[in-house]
Structures are given as structure tokens and as C-alpha cells.
Image (cartoon, rainbow, N blue to C red):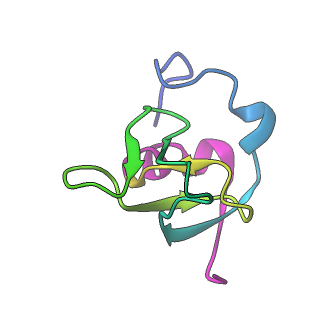
């Protein structure tokens, strides 16, 4: 069980609680956009070696969550993993 004082928690419950999430490969939404960050630990999603290339995201691909943080917080945030791409 994750402690409610975990350093990665910074108010994400306001916009991520109960969301449907999708496991997807990261890709830049625009050519001038080169990376995203995990909403919790700030690891980079980037099309570059030694970075995250896939993770969990909201339907609009706006918020990204790394697999580690997804597993750590899925119960607390009551996420629904969705298979639809």
C-alpha cells in the first residue's frame, strides 16, 4: 500500500482519479513536441534510447503514467485499464 505522503503525490487526484487509462506506445503529438513526463515520478517518455517508450495514458494522450507508478497507484486512484486503442 502506498503511503498518502508519498513524494510522487502532488494533487493528481484532482484530475486522474477514476480515469480510464490505455497502455500505449508514446509518440509525439506534434513534430515540435519531443517528450512527455510521468505525472508522478517525472520519468521521460521520449523517442530516444534509455527512456520510456510506452506507458499508461488518458484517452486524449495528454497525461502519461509510467508502468511503475501505474502499479503503485492503480488502487488508490481506482483506474480502469481500457483495451481500446
79 displayed left or right of 52:
right
Name the residue: 49% across, 51% down.
70
Q: Is residue 15 above or below residue 46?
A: above
Residue 59: percent from left, percent from top: 73, 65
Q: Is residue 47 above or below residue 11?
A: below
The verdict on residue 31 being magenta is no
Quarter of the rendering occupied by the C terminus: bottom right
64 displayed left or right of 42:
right
Name the residue: 35% across, 58% down.
47
Residue 73: percent from left, percent from top: 53, 43
List the single residue furthest toward the bottom: 84
Q: Is residue 67 above or below residue 5?
A: below
Residue 27: percent from left, percent from top: 50, 64
| Residue 82 or residue 38, whichever sits in front | 38
The total number of labels drawn is 0
75 displayed left or right of 38:
right
Residue 35: percent from left, percent from top: 47, 46
| Residue 33 or residue 80, whichever sits in front | 33
List the single residue furthest toward the left: 50
| Residue 25 or residue 72, whichever sits in front | 25
Q: Which residues are magenta?
A: 68-85
Name the residue: 67% across, 84% down.
84
The verdict on residue 78 being magenta is yes
Amino acid at each position: 500500500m502506498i503511503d498518502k505522503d508519498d513524494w510522487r503525490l502532488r494533487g493528481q487526484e484532482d484530475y486522474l482519479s477514476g480515469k480510464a487509462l490505455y497502455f500505449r506506445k508514446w509518440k509525439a503529438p506534434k513534430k515540435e513536441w519531443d517528450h512527455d513526463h510521468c505525472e508522478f515520478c517525472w520519468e521521460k517518455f521520449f523517442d530516444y534510447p534509455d527512456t520510456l517508450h510506452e506507458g499508461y495514458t488518458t484517452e486524449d494522450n495528454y497525461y502519461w503514467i509510467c508502468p511503475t507508478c501505474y502499479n503503485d497507484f492503480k488502487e488508490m486512484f481506482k483506474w480502469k485499464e481500457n483495451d481500446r486503442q
